Amino acid sequence: MRGIDGGLLILGAGGKMGPSLARLAQRASREASVERRIVAVARFTDPGLEAALHAYGIETIRCDLFDAGQVQALPDLPNIVFMAGQKFGTSDDAPRTWAVNAYLPGVVATRFPASRIVAYSTGNVYPLSGREGEGPVESDPTGPIGEYAQSALARERVLEFFSRSQPTPMAILRLNYAIEPRYGVLRDIADKVASRQPIDLSMGRVNVIWQRDANAIALRALQHCAVPPMVLNVTGRPAHPVRWLAGELGRRLGIEPVFRGVEAESALLSDATRCEELFGLPPVGIDEMLDCVASWVAQGGRSLGRPTHYESREGRF
């Protein structure tokens, strides 16, 4: 954060990752002895979240990004992390998913043409690939399955258009899957192990990354924004077998997992080699993730109640 000048605007900061990213940015700026305005922007339907961010010294602004007047009133800051997006509920309300994922990026890009923009995307823009491989790299062809993934690719294309035409330096982060004790693939599997529900093996392998590490990459990517956008797979390597993850969580919880189905020959994977070359290995490894999630579930720690649906092979969310 010493190398990043000016304030930081976090758009869509009320979601699963936004609050912790804001706190990480504030903490890193303080440790770097940099005075920085950090503004978290969201609708903030949970008023307790605003109070928690204020207590950490983070400014908040309530804003509906569909309201042009509210967007225009946002402060002009040189660094933006764009986190707004919709995945769950796509099957019931596809028009809103497309509006959030494909229209709002253009709104933000045209409002902040002189800023650096780091935007979250998803590894769902890739097709399924061979289960035993590393998965696609950033230069491989995309092949989104289902309307959510299609709208996510539309987000990338809209951002790339404005990056080139304005021009605006950007970075697009294809993330899958962020993990913390309250949500994520490991929490989904741990909950099924704990409740002795069968675990679907059809999506046989998954990539995971600790949420803090993913947030750190987003902040560090501000120094790598480019025209056209730098595209980066953000996840951990290697991908892990779902059967093995369930077994390790079951061993920590003292419960034998129950499975159903068989591993398909393909899975949704991403090769994060380029990310590791830029930023090094994520500090939190799979054993520590498993320990943290299993311990949290064992003590009855709360869930965000947002299953990832990682097992979906048809792209329905």
Image (spheres, helix red, strand yellow):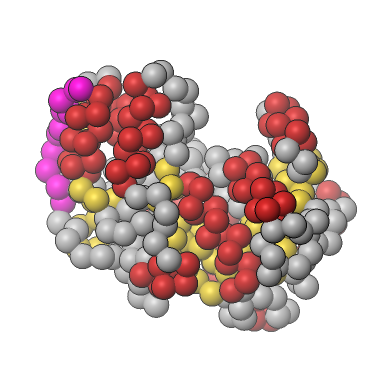
- For residue 258, side relative to residue 177 (left or right): left
- Magenta part of the protein: which range? 254-264
Rendering coords of residue 142 (x, y %): 38, 69
**Of 52 and 189, the residue lying toward us:** 52
Judge whether 152 appears above or below 171 on screen.
above
**Of 41 and 26, the residue lying toward us:** 26
- For residue 165, side relative to residue 251 (left or right): right
Which residue occupies 72% across, 51% down?
A: 30
Which residue occupies 29% across, 34% down?
A: 189
Rendering coords of residue 258 (x, y %): 16, 28
Q: Is residue 276 visible?
A: yes
Quadrant location of residue 138? bottom left
Which residue occupies 58% across, 64% down?
A: 220
Rendering coords of residue 215 (x, y %): 55, 53
Residue placed farthest to the left in the image? 262
State the predominant SS element of the stretch in magenta. loop
- For residue 69, side relative to residue 116 (left or right): right
Rendering coords of residue 305 (x, y %): 46, 28
Q: Is residue 103 visible?
A: no
